[in-house]
Image (cartoon, helix red, strand yellow):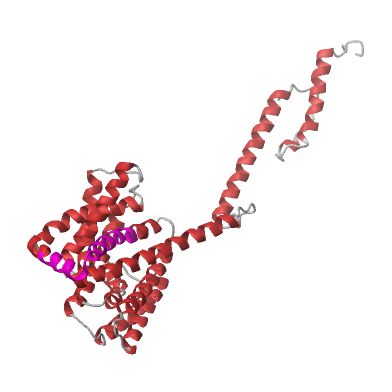
Amino acid sequence: MISSIKPVSPSLTAIAGVRRSIPGKLQFSPLPIIGNFQKPNPFTQKPLLSAQSLSNFTFAAAQEQRSDVFRVRAYEADRSRPIEIGVEVPEEEQSGQKVKIGIYFATWWALNVVFNIYNKKVLNAFPYPWLTSTLSLACGSLMMLVSWVTGLAEAPKTDLDFWKILFPVALAHTIGHVAATVSMSKVAVSFTHIIKSSEPAFSVLVSSLFLGEAFPLPVYLSLLPIIGGCALAAVTELNFNMIGFMGAMISNLAFVFRNIFSKKGMKGKSVSGMNYYACLSMMSLLIVTPFAIAVEGPQMWAAGWQNAVSQIGPNFVWWVVAQSVFYHLYNQVSYMSLDQISPLTFSVGNTMKRISVIVASIIIFQNPIKPVNALGAAIAILGTFIYSQAKQ
């Protein structure tokens, strides 16, 4: 029996050595099932796995486990667990962004105040709001055309669908612009802006009636001081005029529809705020020009212009140019600021803008104002601020 046993060949010894080395590798395997493998008997069993195939299997199993680990992390991230690796924005970038927003606000307010002052001066000497509105839109359109041709600003890439969608926005913008100018030609700048601060009430009303939107209770409650303050200011206004009052109200309604049309139609359109307002001005100019000619006409303009120049002198021409340029600039900056700040911040800035315009107009034009009238204006503006907070 002993003599019938042949010695083990060197090749078999090598294979056995490989088999013996397998458990050593499997001790570090991440799969528990591999650790339960029994060391095979080299004399009674044929090897199930070679060293290379087992190594590949272990590597694939490890890859599968790592994939599971990534899936768990993604799931945990969806459950809003805090991210362990935090990325902080440098303080220099944060301060730079704050400075940028501050510059936007300061420029926006300053341009708006200057526009309202020169616009009121022009309307006092030249009471033709249709032509004044047309000149404002024409000046802005010309400025942007020159910027596109000279390369100072990149021209937008638009198509026919873009202009079709823009038309209702431009129509509402034209009505709101002309109505506001008519209002300021009849009443004080401060009174026009007090009435225009009631725009949130029109926004809620239109959204509820035409869009079927519902708002939280705080939003509805915030409308009470707005309506009450505007009513108190209107009743106590010394130089009240119904045309001026209705012009401001129509302007509010038109601008609410402009915002609704703009939100619905411009989704997905890659046009910057500056170019969007430029296109809006050009289409509004095409809309308002024939109506301005029909309502007022060149004969009235010529007579009124001659009278204004004879009373004011050459400065009147500068007033017209200034109000036209500053009208476009302040609107352009407001649209550009929407690309940089949130709607809530914009609403707060718009509220502060009205305060600056009202205070500046009272100081410059020295309009008489009663304490109760000032109280109504303060209540209305405070209500506008509360509305912007409740809406968000």
Front residue of this view, candidates 19 and 203:
203
The percent position of residue 357, horizontal first and vertical second, equals 34, 72
Q: Residue 250: within the magenta? A: no
Q: Is residue 49 above or below residue 111?
A: above
The picture quadrant where one finds residue 109 is: bottom left
Task: Judge whether 60 appears above or below 361 on screen.
Answer: above
Give residue 44's quadrant in the image. Answer: top right
Residue visible at 63% across and 45% down in the picture: 69
Is the residue 148 above or below the residue 114 in the image? above
In the foreground, 358 or 177: 358
Report x, y in % for residue 352.
40, 72
Magenta-span inclusion, residue 309: yes
Q: Looking at the image, can residue 209 be seen?
A: no
Image x and y of residue 138, in percent: 22, 55
Residue 161, image x and y in percent?
Answer: 23, 46
Q: Is residue 38 left or right of residue 218?
A: right
Question: Which corner quadrant holds the N terminus?
Answer: top right
Q: Quadrant of residue 310?
A: bottom left
Residue 339 is left or right of residue 247, and the answer is: right
Q: Residue at x 64, y 40 (%)?
A: 65
Q: Which residues are magenta?
A: 303-331
Residue 208 visible in the displayed image: yes
Q: On the rendered structure, is 372 left or right of 187?
A: right
Most common secondary structure along the magenta stretch: helix
| Residue at the image position 35 percent from the left and 44 percent from the top | 154
